[in-house]
Amino acid sequence: MSKRKKPSKTAKSRRPVPLSKLELQLPDQLEYLQRSMRDFDAGHTNEYRRIATTIRVLVHNTRASTSLLRQLGMEDVHFVSYARPIDPTNLATEHSLVMIKMGGGGAEFTPVLDQGPPRKLRC
């Protein structure tokens, strides 16, 4: 007795999103990013998840997903970064966007907050 294979529930037909709808998403994503960064800088450090998710939506490309900036043809956008460049000769873990603050209550990550010269980065 042979069993029939059920269709995959995760398989979706992909339809292109109209450019007009994609263009409406960009201001929303930028607003989410600004709000989460403001809240993070105010001490709500759990905002890092929303910041990372929004950045992923904007710039991360894989075989399975296409970033919003690529879909809008805006991959040539420059970003400003205050992170120290990674030292390729350093074999230890680097935290170029945060510092580790240690005290009686333990250790925690603290944002560097615009210290150092800005660098221009490409998407």
Image (cartoon, rainbow, N blue to C red):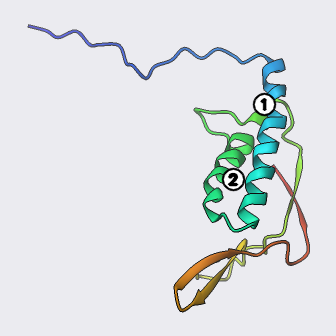
Which is nearer the eye, 113 or 19?
113
The reply to whether residue 26 is visible in this rendering is yes
Which is nearer the eye, 82 or 107?
107
The numbered disc on residue 98 is none
| Vertical side of 3 occupied by 75: above or below | below
| Vertical side of 65 occupied by 94: above or below | below
- State the SS at label 2: helix
> Residue 45 appears at what percent x and percent y?
64, 65
| Vertical side of 16 occupied by 96: above or below | below
> Which residue sits furthest bottom?
104
| Residue type of the residue flagged with mark 2 | Ile
How many tags in the picture?
A: 2
On screen, residue 33 versus residue 104, left or right, reads: right
Image quadrant assignment for residue 67: top right
| Residue type of the residue flagged with mark 1 | Gln
Distance in Å between CA atoms under marks 2 and 1 = 16 Å
Which is nearer the eye, 40 or 79?
40
- Label 1: which residue? 25
| Vertical side of 46 occupied by 9: above or below | above
> Residue 121 appears at what percent x and percent y?
85, 58
Callout 1 crowding tier (Cα within 10 Å): few <14, some 14–19, many ≥20:
some
> Residue 59 appears at what percent x and percent y?
74, 44
Q: Quadrant of the N terminus?
A: top left
> Residue 92 appears at what percent x and percent y?
58, 82
Image quadrant assignment for residue 102: bottom right
On screen, residue 107 versus residue 119, left or right, reads: left
**Mark earlier in primary sequence (2, 1):** 1
- Label 2: which residue? 51
Which is nearer the eye, 57 or 66?
57
